[in-house]
Image (cartoon, grey):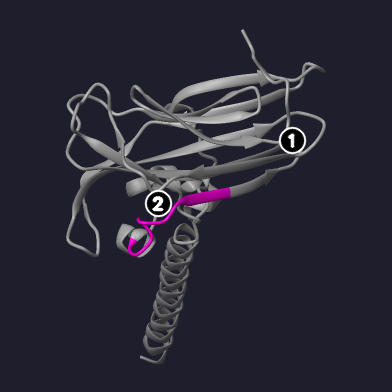
């Protein structure tokens, strides 16, 4: 009898020990899953390398007298929806951005000025548009977002449309700078809308479809379009 009690005690002790080991393993596994989930949540767009090539519509390379390059790249549009100004006037908007890369030996200063005037599209008589330069900077991570990440247009544009829109930007050697351009049309455009910045010597021109507007200058002369 005593021998049977000893055997029963040993069996209970072994069973209890195995149960403890199984419980410890289960708790450890659950904790690991929680930590993994937490590490996934630390990902964000700023830590992701994003290629902008698929967003580019036009690219121009300008060369100085030493053979160094100034590169201007203009994006495809986003938008196509309506914006209503503080007076109740409706526009159809399209948002673009331009990227300037300076591979020359000295910094460049970009001075852009859009007048408050309306411009008519030659290919769409009676359809007028105006251009606006938001102060918000464009970054590569914003390319994946709605409106290229530009914040609420009501906040950006309200009360400013009757004034000229200007931008001054210094681009140092081996640096890239980006800026937004908002085009506001009085009515929708038949077909595609394309826009972008280019240079003729030191003069800046901004084109919207077939309308080209003299819009400022850079501080470097004798730049030629690379062939």
Callout 1 environment at 10 Å: few (<14), some (14 to 19), or many (20+)? some
**Residue 197 x %, y %:** 50, 30
Callout 2 environment at 10 Å: few (<14), some (14 to 19), or many (20+)? some
Residue with the mark numbered 1: 174
Q: Is residue 83 magenta?
A: no
**Residue 84 x %, y %:** 21, 57
As drawn, 104 above or below 81? above
- On the picture, is 144 further left or further right than 110? left
Residue at position x 50%, y 61% in the image? 42
Residue with the mark numbered 2: 149
Total labels: the figure holds 2
Label 2 sits on a secondary structure element that is helix
Residue sticking out furthest to the top: 227
Quadrant where the C terminus sits is: top right
**Residue 222 x %, y %:** 73, 20
Q: Is residue 162 magenta?
A: yes
Marks 2/1: CA–CA distance: 25 Å
Magenta part, dominant SS: loop
Label 1 sits on a secondary structure element that is loop
As drawn, 215 above or below 54? below
Residue at position x 20%, y 34% in the image? 127
**Residue 20 x %, y %:** 44, 78
As drawn, 5 above or below 164? below
> Which image quadrant is residue 96 in?
top left
Q: Nearer the viewer, residue 130 or 189?
A: 130
Find the magenta span and give its range. Answer: 158-167
Q: Nearer the viewer, residue 194 or 47?
A: 194
């Amino acid at each position: 009898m005593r021998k049977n009690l000893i055997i029963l005690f040993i069996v209970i002790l072994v069973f209890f020990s195995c149960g403890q080991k199984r419980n410890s393993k289960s708790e450890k596994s659950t904790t690991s899953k929680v930590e993994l989930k937490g590490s996934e949540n630390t990902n964000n767009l700023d830590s992701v390398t994003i290629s902008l090539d698929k967003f580019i519509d036009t690219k121009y390379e300008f060369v100085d007298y030493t053979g160094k390059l100034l590169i201007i790249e203009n994006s495809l549009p986003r938008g196509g929806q309506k914006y209503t100004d503080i007076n109740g006037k409706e526009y159809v908007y399209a948002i673009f951005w331009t990227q300037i890369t300076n591979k020359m030996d000295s910094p460049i200063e970009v001075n852009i000025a859009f007048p408050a005037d309306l411009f008519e599209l030659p290919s769409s008589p009676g359809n007028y548009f105006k251009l606006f330069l938001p102060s918000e900077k464009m970054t590569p991570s914003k390319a994946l977002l709605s409106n290229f990440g530009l914040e609420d247009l009501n906040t950006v544009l309200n009360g400013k449309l009757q004034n000229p829109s200007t931008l001054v930007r210094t681009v140092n050697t081996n640096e890239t700078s980006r800026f937004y351009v908002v085009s506001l049309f009085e009515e929708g455009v038949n077909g595609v809308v394309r826009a972008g910045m280019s240079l003729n010597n030191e003069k800046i021109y901004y084109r919207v479809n077939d309308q080209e507007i003299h819009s400022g200058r850079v501080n470097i002369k004798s730049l030629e379009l690379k062939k």
